Each structure stands twice: as C-alpha cells, then as structure tokens.
Image: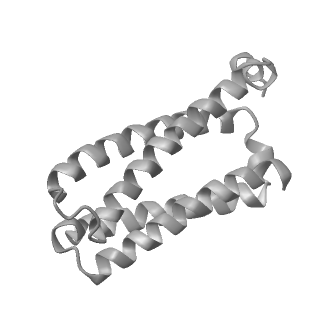
Amino acid sequence: MDIPGWTALATHPWAYPALEVVHIVGIALLLGNLVALELRVWGTAATLPVAALARLALSLSVAGFGLAAASGLLMFSSQPGDLLANRAFVVKIGLLMAAGTNAALFHARGGLQRLDALARAQTVLSLGLWLGMIITGRWIAYA
C-alpha cells in the first residue's frame, strides 16, 4: 500500500535528512543528560544535589527521547519492510527495549536515592546499551 505522505518522506531530498538531524539532536539531549546524571551517581560533582540534577537531566532526557522516538518512527514509516529485515535495526530495537527495562528497574528500586553499587552498575549498563544503539543505528545503512 502506497501512502502519499510516506512516499514523499522517502523521496523528498530534504525530508529524510532533516529527520535524521532531529533524531541526532534527540539522541544528544538524551545521552548527554543521562551521562551527566550517571556521573553524579558515581560520585562526580558530589556537591550537586542529586534530586535537583535528576529533575533537570531527566526532563531533558525525556524530551530528547521524544524527539528521537518521533523522528525514528517517521523514518521507520518510510521503509518498514526493509528495516524489519535489517539485522542492525532489529538489534537496535532490542537494545532500546533493554535500556527501557533497565531504566524502569533503576527508578523502581530508587537508584537515585540509594546511589549504591547496583545503581552504579545499572548506569554502566545504561551507557553501554545507549552506545550500542548509536552504533547499531549507524550500521543500519550498511547492513
């Protein structure tokens, strides 16, 4: 089924690259703020109150995730069959699900209040998962 809007997205010379830029800005907001908060969990900048930093960093991370998710869904809509057949894309989505699960578990157990060894381990896992998503996202074009 050919939907004109999606066809235009896939064929317009500026639409897809513009979505890629929005996607990258979203990733930068998401990952940059997560790294700042994760460094605080590890004890860096101990004078910064965790709760205040978390409110700011998590708000910006959620906004970044929203941009990345919305632009990613639009890019996906332009070629769903090709992407679902692409191993790098499938791995990226699996990593995304794992990162979401890790974040939910981190917050459910009060990782920001505990700042314990498990909270630190979860931040290392988080960073690894997000970096894995960036790497596999780049591999999509070459897989």
- Looking at the image, which residue sits at the far right? 142
Q: Quadrant of the C terminus?
A: bottom right
User: Residue at 38% across / 37% down in the picture?
Assistant: 63
x, y percent for residue 53 = 22, 51
Is 41 located above or below residue 48 in the figure?
Answer: below
* Left or right: 132 in relation to 42: right
User: Residue at 76% across / 37% down in the picture?
Assistant: 79
- Looking at the image, which residue sits at the far bottom? 117
**Quadrant housing residue 15:** top right
x, y percent for residue 132 = 61, 63
Q: Nearer the viewer, residue 81 or 140?
A: 140
Q: Nearer the viewer, residue 39 or 106?
A: 39
Q: Nearer the viewer, residue 113 or 79?
A: 113
User: Residue at 18% across / 59% down in the picture?
Assistant: 50
User: Residue at 36% across / 55% down in the picture?
Assistant: 36
**Quadrant housing residue 86:** bottom right
